[in-house]
Structures are given as structure tokens and as C-alpha cells.
Image (spheres, rainbow, N blue to C red):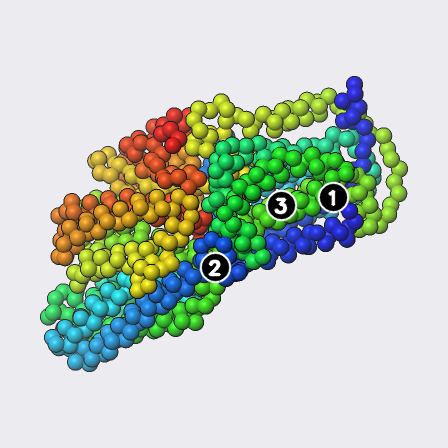
Amino acid sequence: MSVKLLSFSLVVLLAGLVSCNSDTGSPAGAGFNRTAMLGYYADYHILPAMDTVASNNEALYQAVLALTAAPSAENLNTTRQQWRTTYLSWQSASAFTLGPTGEQGLRRRLSEEVGTFPVSEAKIQQYSLAGDTSFTNFDRDSRGLFALEYFLWAGGDQIVLARLNQAQQAAYFRAATRRLRDDLRAARTGWQQFRDDFVRSNGTSAGSSTTQLYNEFLLAYEGLKNFKVGLPMGLRVGQTQPEPTKVEAYYSGYSLLGLAQQLNALESFWRGDRQAAGPGFKHYLQSVVGGEALVAQTEYQLGIIRQKLEACGSGRLDSLVAIQSPLVLDLHTELQRNTRFFKSDMSSLLGLTITFSSGDGD
Amino acid sequence: MNWRYQLEKPVSLAPLVSLRILVGLLMLVGGIRFLALGWVDSNYVQAKIQFKYAGFEWVAMPQPPELLYGLFAVMLLSAVGVLLGAWYRWSAGILWLSFTYIELLDVSWYLNHYYFISLMLGIMAVLPAHKRYSVDVWRGAVQEHGTVAAWMVALPRFQLAVLYVYAGVAKMQADWLLDAMPMRLWLPANNHQPVLGWLFGWEYSPWLFSWAGMLYDCTIVFWLSWRKSRPWAYATVLVFHGLTGCLFQIGMFPLVMALITLVFFEGQTHERWQRRLFGARSIASSSAKPTPIYTWVLLSVFVAFQVLFPWRFVLEPGKLFWTEAGYRFSWRVMLMEKAGTATFYVTDASGREGMVHNSDHLLAHQEKQMAFQPDLIVQYAHYLKDHYSSQGQAVTRVRAEVYVTLNGQPSRLYFSPQLNLLTLQAQGSRHWLYPAP
């Protein structure tokens, strides 16, 4: 072969490698249609969730303005109701920390900005006394939804109202609320603009929409198990006893409600049954070899988890945690049992990688 | 003796000169790519733990870890030295050692093609690939030569043959050929690809690809060696590695194979290419010195090792894919789909047991690899003991609940969740695993 022919072949090889590594391709080929799945997730899960939480939070913002202008039992009650609505709708949005709500978008993960718990009362006090409302620090436990919860509940009605009468505290509360509003607004607008790019990236490599969506789903599930249940129960290595104050929504006591809400959202995400009948990850699994068996196992285990969660009742999670209730322990055990179905088994059948950056394989 | 005459007879140096230039170039591009992707930081500097290779426990991250960038700089510089044939013996030796050191840092990043490159660099370091078209000739450090002993050109070809043939033999098993596993999992994930997406999604493609892959690996060296089939064989090499490059995230590997297999072309062909690229230079052919006896001994040991080492798994009990005893360094490339979910529990002297969050200690990639490789599981258990002991806990037991899925089968318990992993050694036998499903 001549040098020319050889160089030509190599250039063809290189061009082929570069072009096929791009993650957007033909809209529909043989087999499962990932484009349709991504469209479903964008239109029936992500965009509605971002829209709902942002709208609810607008109302919360207005309520906080009214409350800090005129602290009263009535205004406090209204604001608390609005916080509850926002908190519950956040549970459907928290898993979508990618694209405009991931590190590439806001330059910080939305789930951490909005949902970090437990908050640090000391840091909140420190920043509010210093009049520092820049929120440029990395102390995410001094802002977000649960910092607002602190201002609305911590210490009981009298102390809450007294705190709101202090100018610096009220100012920090308002600023944190405005910050949350801005973040959730940006998340909503960001996703409206990102929607088409998200759907177009229909491959399965490390940076693809499907892989990122899957990884965030997995992260949210493991976060629910480890941080919303395991950590308060004192199950993590190094803990010597339960730590009831580390439950999510400790001040308001809505922990179990929020837990149920997020579990619903994650289940309906996996099943692909919110408003329309998918296609979601369950349908994707049903289209691949070995998928039906995994779907059956997962459905069975999700049923048990639901029973265990209902057994915990609708009281305060921190009270159950404080007495090391076997009900909560059972819930954790069953959540743990399901982990492998979502983690190794699902990623293996779908050919998705459990890493966010792309290393090489061989 | 006839074999000795065949191996010592002078042949053209040209294939080795091409190999030197291509390997130098690949190492340079590969190293720069690794740096540009930020992998030095994300894969090494950020890691809190390195999984060790048996016998190479002494290979450790430089302190501070950022010094690794210095090692990369040394590697890139020596790659340039190899490419240009400048201070070649030093450059090739340093390139080989620095690359191999980096590869030995963490077994969780093990790749067959990294092992292959290490071997290739070792081979290049002992061959006189700098005796033509090199800075060393130009500066008068070595005398220009047009020929070398035949075994010197045969050695890199042998190494390629080992890689391909063993990769092919490894595919001769029921999962791969009859069930088309794991191709039936991997191909449909690529049905979005432009142009060829329909083919990857077609229901019979997994069998087509499995058989074609096996036949390609087993026979390509023969087709490349036979003059009449060589151009077609090389075109097949490009198509095959182009396709695998499209399907799998295997980085530089397709390019590495596409370029290094050029060594199968005859000396005359390489000479023609080099004349066109660098200009014609006539050279007096010189008679080669006889190869000393110790070289024959070393060569025989190396060849025997390469031929025998991949077979060591037959000495190990249990199913190879399940136990992975003897799996590495055996050219089992893209052969199975395996994944695990591993949860570790640490017990202290008071009897209290706590669950470990793997992400506190491991990179996502490390966790993924550890979760289905027995020796890494044991290494991690010992690391956890050391880590929590240093935090003042008297760790008495580390156990783990590990579920492993192989080729799409439902995941199963890998070993008893009650087993105290601290009683095991990473390099010990793997009798503690449950039998393969």
C-alpha cells in the first residue's frame, strides 16, 4: 500500500471514531427508542416538577415577605402551609440534578443548594448577625429550604415570632428565601431551554442524558436510604447512637411525609407511569434480555418497601428514630435490599456506566 | 542450526523504525489526552486509596500527589525521545518504566491494552530501533544500520500474535458463541448510532458480532502475515477496530492497534514509506553480530512466559468469570458484563456495627471495579480496618454484603455476608466465594 492510501485509511478510521463517538444520532433505530423515553421524562417528570416547585416557591416567597413585614400567628401559619407545599413538591424535583441544575449548569448542584440538611443553626446565626447575605460561601447548610424551615419552626411559635422581629434575622430569612426563589426560577428556565438538547443526546456513553439521568436517580435513591433513614438511625460506621435531629425536615416534623413523597416520585420515575404510560426505565428494561425478571424482582421489593413505610405511620420520624424503632430499621433493610436491583443489575442490563466521567475500558 | 539461522539472518530494520516513530507518537498523544481530560487529577490525585497489584505493593502515589504531573512530564519527554530516536536507549527505558509505574499505581484502572503497551515499550527498549532516521545517527552516537537480526522484527509481531490469538481463544465458550452474551446487552445500547444504528439494534447482530469477533481475533495475525492477503487483512483491521471504537468506550485502543499492526508489513514496504517521508538515503548493509547465548535464554524465558501465563487459570478451582483467579494479564478483552453492589459493615470492640458509605473512600470507578473483584474486596476491607482504627475505633470485623451479576443473570450473593474479610489475604485462594451460578 502506498503512503497516500494508508494515510487515507487512517483518516477514515479517525473520522469514523470521532463522528460515531458523538452522542446524538438517528432518532429511531431498531430496538428501544431512547429518544422517546427522554422526551417522556422531560415532558412528564422533569419540566412539570421544576415548574411546580418553582411556582409553589413563588407563593412561599410572597408569604415570607408578608410575614417578615408583619410577624403574626396568622401570617406564620400561612407561610408554614406554603413551605410544606414547596417542600413536598421539591421531592419530585430533587433527583434531576443534571444539565442546567447540575454542576455544568448553575455551577453547583441544585439538590445541594436547595435540599442540604440538617442545617447548622450556628452558621445561620453567624451569617445573619454579620449581615452576610452573599451566599457565595460553601456552607450549604446555612441556606436552602431547610434554613427557611428553621426560621419558621425552630424553638416554637413564641421564639419564631420573636426572631422575626429582629431586623438582622428577618433580613437573612428574606434573603435566603429570595436566593431560593432565584435558584428555582433559574432551574425552571434552564430546563425549558435545555429540553431539546437533553432529548437529542440519546446515546448511552458516560455523558449521555440516559446515563446521567440514571446516575442521578441512583444517587437520589441511595441518598434517601443513607441520609434520610440510615444516618438519623445511627447506622453509619462511627456513629454510636441514633441522631434524631439529623432527619430531613426535623423542625416541622414533616419527615415521613417528605420521605413518602420522594419514594413515590422515584418509583413513578422508574416505572414511567406519571400522567402518561412511559416509556420509562421499566419499559426500557422490558425491552432487553433478562429485563422482565429484574422488573418482577424490583416490583416485588418496591411493594415490600411501601408496606414498611406505611407501617412507620404518619407521626414524627425523629421520635421513631429516638427509640430506635424496629419499624424504621425494617424500612432501611428493605431499601437496602432493593439497592442492587437499581444499581448493578439495572446498569448491567442496560449497558449504562455508574460513573460520571468517562474512563477508558478495554 | 536452521532455526538459529532463520532467527539471526539480517532483515530490514525499517519495520522497527516505523514502530519506534508510531509508538513514540501514540505515547505522546495518549499522554497529552490523559492530561487534557483531567484524568491525572480525577483518577489519581483525588483518590484516597490505591488498589495494589500483587508483588507491586511498593508502587505508591508520589507525595504530594501533584508530583504525578512531574512523572507525566518525564513520560512525555521520553516519548519525544523515542519518536525522534534521540538518546534512544535512555528515552525508551524511561518511557517504559514511567508508563509502567503509572499503570501499577492502581489495579482498579487495569486495562489489557495498558498491559500490552507496557510489554511493547519493554520490547522497544531492548531493540535497536534508533539505527536509522534518528537523532542518534545524526549526532553520530550510533552507526547507521539498515538491517537487524530477524528475531528483532519477529518479537513485536509475536507479542501482537499473543494478544490476538488469546483474545480469540478466550471467546471460544458457550456464553459468547451460543448465547451471544454479553453482545446481546452491549449492541442494543448503541442503536442510536448514525448509519449503523439499525445494525446494532437488529436481533441477530449479537451472534454475527460474537462469531466475527472470535474469528477475527483467532486468525487476523495469519492473514496479516501472508503477503497476498495482507492489504485486505489490514483493511479488516481498520474496520474491526473502527467498529469496536464506535461501540465501546475504549479510548485510544483502536488507534493503537490500527497503527501497531503496521509492523506486519514487509521491510521493503516500510522502506518505501520512509524514503517518501524522509528522503532516500543509501546505506551499506552490514553483517549482524551473532546473538549472544544469554539473549537467547532471556528471549526463550520471555516467550515461554507470554505463552504460558494466560493459562494459569486452569490451575485455579471455580469458574474463571466468577472468581477471576487468573483473569488479568490474559488478554480477556471485552469478554463479559459483570457488575456488583457491595455494602461493607465495620464492627468495633464494643460490638457495634456500622455501615460504610463507599463514596466516602472510593472514586465511583473504584467502587464499580471493587464490587465484583474478590482481591479488591479484601484489599478494601483491610483499608477500612486501617482507616477506622486510625480514627480511634478498635475494628474487630469487616464484613460485606456483595451481590454480583454476570452476563445479565440476576445478581447473587458473592460470598457469606457473615464472613470476616479481615481473616483473608487479597492474594490468597478464593475458596471463600460461593460457587458460580
* Residue type indicated by callout 2: Asn
- Residue in the image at 24% along x and 78% along y: A62
Circle 3 residue: B240
Residue positioned 56% across, 43% down in the render: B209
Residue A239 spot, x, y in % from top left:
24, 45
Q: Residues within 10 Å of mark 1 (few under 14, many from 20)?
A: some
Q: Chain of mark 1?
A: B
Q: Secondary structure at mark 2?
A: loop
Q: Chain of mark 3?
A: B
Horizontal side of residue B400 vs B291, given as left or right: left
The residue where tag 2 is placed is A202
- The residue where tag 1 is placed is B231
Res A77 quadrant in image: bottom left
**Between A241 and B389, the one nearer to me in the picture:** A241
Q: Between residue A191 and residue B352, name the one nearer to us.
A: A191
Say if B190 sits above or below B58 in the image.
Answer: below
Residue at the (25%, 76%) spot, across then down: A59
Q: Residues within 10 Å of mark 2 (few under 14, many from 20)?
A: many
Residue located at (48% from left, 44% from top): B184
Outermost residue to the top: B1
Tag shown at residue B206: none
Q: Residue B32 location in percent, x, y? A: 60, 52
